[in-house]
Amino acid sequence: MSELNNQLFEEILQARQRVYAVGSPTPLQELCLPDCQARVFVKREDLGPIKAYKWRGAYNCMAKLPPEERARGVVAASAGNHAQGVALAAARLGCRAHIFMPRSTPQVKQNAVRMHGGEHVHIVLTGDSYDAASAAAHAFAEAEGLTFVHPYDDLRTMGGQGTLADEVVMSGMGSFDRVYLQIGGGGLAAGCACWFKHFWPQCRCIGVEGVDQASMKLAVESGARGVLPYVDVFCDGTAVRQAGEYTFEICRELLDGFVTVSNEEVCRAIRTLWTSNRTVTEPSGAMGLAALLQDEAAGRLRPGEKCLVVLSGANMDFSRFGVVAARAGVSSEPKRRQRYLQIPMVTRRGEILKYLENIPEGVLLTDVQYGRLAGEIQHPVFGVLGTDEQFEDIRRRLARFGLEARDVTNDADVRFRMISYDRERLHHPVFFVIEFPERPGAFTEFMRAMGEYANLCYFNYQYSGEVVGRALVGLEFASREDRDACRALANTLRGTTIQSIHELPDDVRHRVLDRMSPAE
């Protein structure tokens, strides 16, 4: 090992006494993943003092400061877990901590910092990003002669974070063949890889980064610490534009490879943790498992191989759960994916029913976005969940009608559900809010019954995971007589084909129509 790695090993060795005086070791648990050939263990840092691993490095760094230096106070910059770790350390060590946070930091995170630090913390809200808050914190520290507690690029911080690996080694549940270590600035990966490689030289240490956060991978592959022009902040705990100076040198020497994961893969990993262990983690906390599941799907794991992932934190705002669930999709089966397909449709009665009746068995309809626009050819969007083979079956079925679907999964208007609608094109419209059993074919039965009278002009449905599906459906009619007959039929369907149906009152319907954007 290099001299720097030897220094880090000594830091971890010394950090154990300090860290274990404050927090107990977090559990190491085996996950039950029926579709995975490997044995998977998870280090539960979400059960630590601040529900994340960051307190280890912050406390060790601050505890190692000379007493007179610590008494003057410390400075930190963070929008999340590092801030809570510094606050906890300040309270335990009886010193003052000035914590700079972006002005956009949610109140729940500010409250958590105050809860852990109490009167020992002073929060300064400044700038609109971590970079801006960090620059202000460094300037303040220099002007006041105070110590800046770095979240990762300090041997003392990395030494504290490496105690996580010490607990794994001491658990007696090793050794491990693979360890997945998420990377922001690289402190966790550097500290843990240093310790694991010392005790288990054969262990493969794999760095995990977000697709648009891979600053360490860029640095290692290019040989220089480049700055990412853009960094995605969905996994906010690992959103770092440039790898640390010390962490780069250590990771370059010790990591055996990298895996980059998408936000959707992270969300699916969060769902997997919930399904297997009833555990909820923040996005960055599930990145290690996301990488493992990616390797499993690609056939890179051997049967029986022992793998370790770190659940690095669980400090997620409650309001984000819905976003995570939506991006995870509706199936935990690795071979089933959700796609959005835009399919041309002639504007005539019963046309959409033809598509619904040709959905292959086993494919789940998860989303429909359609609004009537100008022209005889319309372009509804269908969200469907299936395997590659099932999507190929859909392609073949459409080809029999001379149609070809366009994959619009990543289109912004689909993701944000921008359903355009031209009210001038409608004839005698009626809008219904319907509830139907959330099973294959239920809505098809409804449209088959209504299709004798009506043409679909609007459809807004999204799978919610409940036992009933809910949709806003607009129907148009060739005559008032057809409209009245359909209304009568709708009342007879309630409680049979569908569970409930309610027509929007005229004033509500007019408000809905007024919000629709006419085609240009």
Image (cartoon, rainbow, N blue to C red):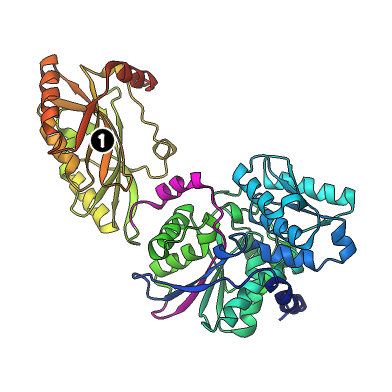
Q: Amino acid at mark 1?
A: Pro
Q: Residue at x 62, y 84 (%)?
A: 199
Depth check, front residue: 520 or 367: 367
Point out the stretch of residues depicted in magenta: 302-331
- Classify residue 100 as left or right of residue 468: right
Dividing the picture into quadrants, the one containing residue 252 is bottom right
Q: Residue at x 75, y 77 (%)?
A: 14
Q: The C terminus appears in which quarter of the rendering? A: top left
Q: Is residue 374 above or below residue 445?
A: above
Q: Residue at x 63, y 50 (%)?
A: 112
Q: Which residue is mark 1?
A: 344
- Classify residue 84 as left or right of residue 381: right
The spot of residue 274 in percent (x, y) is 42, 60
The spot of residue 396 in percent (x, y) is 20, 50
The tally of labels here is 1
What secondary structure is marked by label 1? loop
Q: Is residue 217 above or below residue 235?
A: below
Depth check, front residue: 118 or 455: 118
Depth check, front residue: 315 or 348: 315
Residue 463 covered by magenta stretch: no
Q: Is residue 449 above or below residue 376?
A: below
The spot of residue 453 in percent (x, y) is 11, 25
* Res 278 visible: yes
Dividing the picture into quadrants, the one containing residue 337 is bottom left
Q: The N terminus appears in which quarter of the rendering? A: bottom right
